[in-house]
């Protein structure tokens, strides 16, 4: 019995004591964050699967883990010999988490979980399933915590202030805007659990999740007061004083669970069901009316203001300089020494951190050579990484957190000779990427509308990629942010943003790919700002402004596969890359960039 089997067996013993038939362990903290701190990595600790998303269910007889298409290969490898069965989400014949619970739960059975790690909508759905079996939901106990003896402490990193020269608006202005949205929704109280919305609202940042500059906290506000529930030792005196000037009062982190119990009958509290944990929701008195609305901060935060937009453009120039230097370094040195995926990741980080405005990475760098690149979210470690050989493709997906904004870029680099098939596949991915960058569309279009534009070149050849095409990106915040995303699947849970219309100022990724298991992976990613185009009798047209400025791999492009318009866009892009980034580089790097961005002729 290995360590994961032992841990699951201990959990099953605790389940038996509590009379639970199934126990749910999601990938979540108390704020429904996408990425979580070490204290909250219960699913990874139990199962051995370390991906950033996945759900574990343990029954009396078995343990099953649900992972999405980004992690099929990684999860299969990590779950070997753990006794945990991999459930490939979306695959034919694979039940959903909800279907599995309904099937496995006996009559009058009990489903257990830590209610702070599921959101309101999930809790309600589980209750509906349980009704069919006359079952019960026990969500008051953290059973994993009871057996996790060396569990890391909850993070309480220092909070710091974000100046308005970066934020573009004062915290007082933002609070006023949120109150206006509350009034419009008919609410006099608003409970905010999502940490990125909170730090945006208060013009603060922290470091309580690796690479995500957020603060473990809640906010409950009304038309007069803003209560900020935070770990007090994380807030220095000068930060507290600045917040108090804006009418923000500080309270202990867990006090919010008691304070919501004191809401009045006349109160109408606004919460977002997919951001608020079920235990917190259940603490609201039954006599208090709950209004389910998207956090106004999420919408306001997603539409970058003019100051943020200008800063974002500057951040991407800084980032492009680092990435161009990295690509030159890689091409120059591959085959001459011991370059591994891990050492390459560290080198790319070092180039970014040379800029004084770079505060951190925006996520763990994905450096993947050859077959490893077929795992979408593969990340090397010092002990487990491949050597980069002078042949085939090398993929790097990386980004930085700058005072001027958050970056996210993927490039697939030729480190040696390529096959004709590799070039064709690279060009198909690039073609879809260019088509989205060139897209012009009427206001009201969403990611579900636009995704077909990107996938068409691949679909025409019976190919596809098993992840979304694009996600929103924060400002010195989470690299994955709503409210928008680009994904054609209308029934995707947790992907409601693919029906949100694109608004001026939204920052979104453009990242199609193609992954051939055991062979290679390709992904090409830029970030784009949405802006208004012309307005006429047909309505308001919208378009994208690309803000990432790093060359594509010329030697992997088959120009005969591109239309004239696509090739013209590509050459104009490369011309701008050289003119903008070239002057920032050393002589040798600049000479390489001139060649890397040279005009590609029609064939």
Image: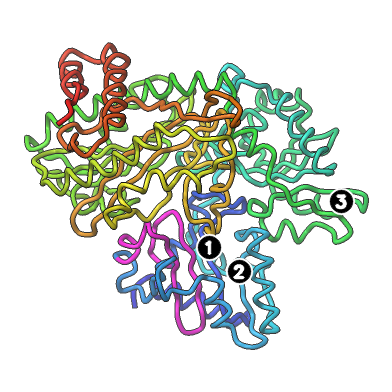
- Of residues 34 and 536, the one drawn nearer to the viewer in this rendering: 536
Does residue 159 show up?
A: no
Q: How crowded is mark 2: few (under 14 residues within 10 Å), some or many (20 or more)?
A: many
Tell me: 223 left or right of 143: right
Q: Which residue is drawn at 26% across and 54% down?
A: 461
Residue 48 in magenta stretch: yes
Estimate the spatial distance between the alpha carbons at disc 1 and disc 3, rounded to whole Å: 29 Å
Q: Position of residue 483 (x, y in %)?
A: 58, 42
Of callouts 3 and 2, the N-terminal one: 2
- Residue underneath mark 1: 26
Work out whether residue 393 or residue 463 is closer to the camera in this orientation and state it. Answer: 463
Residue position marked by numbered label 3 in the rendering: 263
Q: Give me the residue at 37% from left, 27% from top.
A: 548
Residue drawn at x 46%, y 43% as measured from the top left: 450
Residue 504 vs residue 359: left or right? right
As drawn, the residue found furthest toward the bottom would be 107
Q: Does the CB distance between marks 1 and 2 fall below 8 Å? A: yes
x and y, in percent, of residue 475 in the image: 52, 30
Above or below, comparing residue 149 to residue 243 in the picture:
below
Q: Is mark 3 on a helix, strand or loop?
A: loop
Position above or below: 14 against 145: below
Q: Residues within 10 Å of mark 1 (few under 14, many from 20)?
A: many
* Residue 432 in the image, given as x and y percentages of width and height: 34, 41
The chosen color scheme is rainbow
Please report the bounds of the magenta region as a residue range. Answer: 47-76
SS under mark 1: loop
* Residue holding disc 2: 113
- Sequence-earlier tag: 1 or 2: 1
The quadrant of the picture occupied by the N terminus is bottom left
x, y percent for residue 5: 39, 75
Horizontal arrangement in the rendering, residue 328 relative to residue 501 (left or right): left
């Amino acid at each position: 019995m290995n360590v994961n089997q032992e841990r699951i067996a201990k959990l099953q013993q605790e389940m038996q004591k509590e009379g639970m038939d199934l126990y749910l362990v999601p990938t979540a903290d108390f704020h429904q964050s996408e990425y979580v701190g070490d204290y909250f990595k219960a699913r990874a600790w139990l199962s051995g699967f370390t991906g950033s998303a996945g759900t574990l269910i343990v029954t009396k007889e078995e343990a099953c883990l649900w992972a999405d298409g980004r992690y099929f290969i990684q999860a299969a490898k990590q779950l070997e010999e753990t006794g945990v069965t991999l459930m490939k989400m979306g695959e034919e014949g694979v039940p959903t988490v909800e279907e599995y619970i309904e099937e496995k739960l006996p009559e009058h059975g009990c489903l257990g979980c830590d209610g702070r790690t599921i959101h309101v909508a999930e809790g309600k759905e589980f209750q509906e399933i349980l009704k069919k079996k006359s079952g019960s939901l026990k969500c008051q106990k953290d059973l994993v915590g009871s057996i996790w003896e060396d569990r890391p402490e909850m993070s309480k990193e220092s909070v710091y202030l974000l100046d308005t020269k970066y934020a573009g608006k004062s915290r007082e202005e933002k609070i006023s805007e949120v109150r206006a949205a509350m009034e419009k929704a008919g609410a006099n109280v608003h409970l905010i659990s999502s940490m990125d919305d909170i730090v945006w609202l208060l013009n603060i940042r922290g470091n309580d999740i690796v690479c995500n500059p957020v603060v473990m906290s809640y906010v409950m506000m009304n038309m007069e007061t803003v209560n900020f529930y935070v770990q007090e030792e994380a807030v220095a005196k000068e930060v507290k004083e600045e917040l108090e000037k804006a009418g923000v009062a500080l309270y202990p982190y867990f006090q919010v669970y008691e304070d919501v119990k004191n809401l009045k009958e006349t109160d109408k509290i606004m919460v977002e069901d997919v951001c608020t944990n079920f235990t917190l929701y259940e603490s609201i008195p039954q006599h208090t009316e709950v209004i389910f609305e998207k956090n106004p901060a999420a919408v306001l935060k997603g539409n970058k203001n003019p100051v943020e937009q200008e800063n974002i453009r500057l951040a991407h120039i800084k980032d492009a300089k680092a990435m161009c230097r990295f690509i030159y370094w890689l091409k120059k040195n591959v085959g001459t020494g011991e370059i591994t995926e891990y050492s390459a990741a560290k080198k790319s980080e070092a180039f970014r951190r040379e800029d004084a405005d770079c505060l951190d990475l925006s996520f763990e760098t994905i450096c993947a050579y050859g077959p490893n690149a077929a795992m979408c979210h593969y990340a090397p470690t010092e002990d487990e990484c491949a050597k980069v050989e002078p042949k085939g493709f090398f993929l790097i997906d990386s980004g930085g957190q700058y005072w001027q904004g958050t970056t996210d870029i993927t490039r697939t680099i030729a480190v040696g000779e390529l096959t004709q098939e590799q070039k064709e596949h690279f060009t198909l991915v690039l073609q879809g990427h260019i088509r989205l960058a060139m897209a012009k569309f009427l206001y009201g279009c969403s990611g579900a509308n636009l995704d077909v534009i990107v996938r068409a070149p691949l679909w025409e050849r019976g190919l596809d990629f098993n992840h979304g095409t694009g996600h929103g990106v924060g400002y010195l915040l989470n690299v994955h942010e709503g409210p928008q995303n680009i994904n054609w699947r209308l029934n995707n849970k947790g992907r409601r943003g693919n029906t949100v219309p694109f608004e001026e100022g939204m920052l979104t990724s453009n990242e199609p790919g193609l992954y051939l298991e055991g062979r290679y992976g390709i992904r090409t990613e830029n970030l784009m700002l949405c802006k208004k185009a012309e307005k006429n009798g047909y309505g308001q047209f919208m378009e994208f402004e690309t803000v990432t400025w790093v060359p594509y791999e010329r030697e992997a492009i088959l120009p005969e596969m591109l239309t004239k318009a696509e090739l013209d866009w590509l050459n104009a892009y490369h011309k701008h890359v050289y003119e903008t980034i070239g002057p920032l580089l050393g002589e040798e790097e600049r000479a390489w960039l001139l060649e890397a961005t040279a005009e590609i002729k029609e064939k």
